[in-house]
Amino acid sequence: MEILQALFFPPEQPGGVSSMVPYMQDRFNKVGWPTDLFSLPKRIRGKGTEEVRLHTFDPEPYRDNPIAAKYLQTLSDYLWWTKMRIKRNYDLIHAHHPVAALVMKQVFPDTPLVVTIHSSYERELILNGKIEEGGPEHRFLASIYRELEHAADRLLTVSDSFRRYMAPYVDDAEAIGVIANGFDERRFKPISHENEVTQLITVCRLVPAKGIDILLRACAELKDKGHPFVLHIIGDGPIRKELETLATELGLYDDIIFYGYMLHPEEFMPFFDVFVLPSRAEAFGSVFAEAALCWLALVGTDVGGIGEQIEEGVNGLLVPPDDAAALAAALERLITDQTFRYQLARAAWDKAKKAYSLTRVISQLKQVYLEAAPGAAES
C-alpha cells in the first residue's frame, strides 16, 4: 500500500502531530508500505485562486469576515500547491489537518481518505481572546467538522474527550474513531539525576490557552511559602513579553528561565523533575506523554485529553483550570515529597510506554487503512 501523509505545518515544526508523523513514515516504510509526507511551506501564501468546493454549508455569508476569508484563502493556497507538486496517485491519503483533508478530497476524489482531527482551531481562538464563542468565526470554523465528516472515508481524533467536543457539529459522532498519539520511545532517554533544588519545566506555545499566567501565580505562592524551585519555560509566542513582565511583577525574576523556541525539547527534559502545564483546553496534550517518557512527574489540568492521560494520584496530579491555589498545592506536594514524586514519575513512564507507543499507533492505523482501502494489496 502506498500512502500519503498530508500535514499542514512542515514536519520540522514542534508539536505532537509534526513530531509524530515523520516517525510514522519511517515505520511504514520499514514494513513495506511506501509513505510520503506533504505540507504547505510557510512562504506559500496568497497564491491560490481556485476555490475548494464545500458541500455541507455555504461559505459565502462568511467571506467578509477576516478569519473566515483567511481560512478560505489558505484552502486555495493548499489546493494550488497540491496540484503543482503532486503528480502521482496513492492507494490512501491520511490527512492530519482540515485544510489538507478538504483539498486532498477535491484533488483525489477517488482515493480513500482518512482524516485525523488533532485539535480545535476555533476553541484555541476563543481561549486566546481572538474570537467570541457563538460569533460568525466560531460558526464558520465549527461547520468544518461536518464538512470533514462528509469528505472522509474514516474520521479519527485523538481522545474520547475531543470526540465528545465534536459531537454537536457532526451527524454521527459514534462513527469517529479514537487513536491517541504515539511516540517513538527511542527518542526519549531518561537520565538518573538528583537536583538539589526542584526543577520544574513546561513546554508550550506562549498563548493564553496554555495557562502560563496561572502557573506563574502558583509559583509566586510557592515562593511566598519558602519552597525553593526553578521554573524552565520552553516555547515562544505572542504573550511572551506579557508573561516576562508578570514574572517580574510577582518577584520571580530569579526563579524562572524563558528559553524561547526549541526544536527537540525531549532532549532537554530528562534533566528536570516535574512537568507542569495548566492548559485551559487540550485535545490530547502530546507533551504530557513526552514528559512521561522522560521520567518526569506530571501536573496538569483536568481538561480534554490530559485527564485521559493522568490518573489523579497514580501517575500524576490533576487540578482544575484557572486555579492557581490548587496548582500551587499540587506543586508543593511534589517539591516536599521526593518519594511520591518518584512514584508518580515511574507510573507515568510505565503507562506512556504501554499506551502511547508508536508501535501501537502503527498497528491501529494499519487496520484502519486496510478497512478504508480494501483493494490495496498488503505487502
Image (cartoon, rainbow, N blue to C red):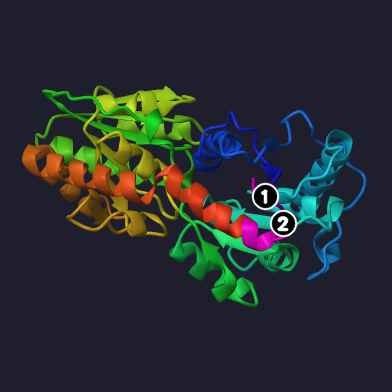
Q: Position of residue 79 (x, y in %)?
A: 84, 45
Q: Position of residue 232 (x, y in %)?
A: 31, 28
Between 97 and 222, the one lying in front of the other is 97
Q: Amino acid at mark 1?
A: Ala
Q: Is residue 271 left or right of residue 160?
A: left
- Identify the residue position indicated by label 2 in the image: 113
Circle 1 sits in a helix, a strand or a loop, which is it? Answer: strand
For the stretch drawn in magenta, the main secondary structure is: loop
- Does the magenta run of residues contain 343? no
Disc 2 to disc 1: CB gap under 8 Å: yes
Q: How far is mark 2 from mark 1, CA to CA?
A: 7 Å
Q: Amino acid at mark 2?
A: Leu
Q: Which quadrant does the C terminus fall into? A: top right
Snapshot quadrant of residue 336:
top left
- Identify the residue position indicated by label 1 in the image: 95
Snapshot quadrant of residue 141:
bottom right
At 92% across and 44% down in the image, what residue appears? 49
Q: Position of residue 132 (x, y in %)?
A: 60, 61
Please tell me whether residue 187 is drawn above or below residue 279 in the rendered image. above
Q: Is residue 207 left or right of residue 11?
A: left
Circle 2 sits in a helix, a strand or a loop, which is it? Answer: strand
At 74% across and 68% down in the image, what residue appears? 150
Residue found at the very far bottom of the displayed protein: 171
- Does the magenta run of residues contain 371? yes
Taking the image as drawn, is residue 138 in sight?
no
Q: Is residue 41 left or right of residue 116?
A: right
Q: Position of residue 324 (x, y in %)?
A: 26, 50
Label 2: few (<14), some or many (≥20) within 10 Å?
A: many
Camera-nearest label, 2 or 1: 2
At 54% across and 65% down in the image, what residue appears? 177
* Residue stretch in magenta: 370-379
At 46% across and 60% down in the image, what residue appears? 159
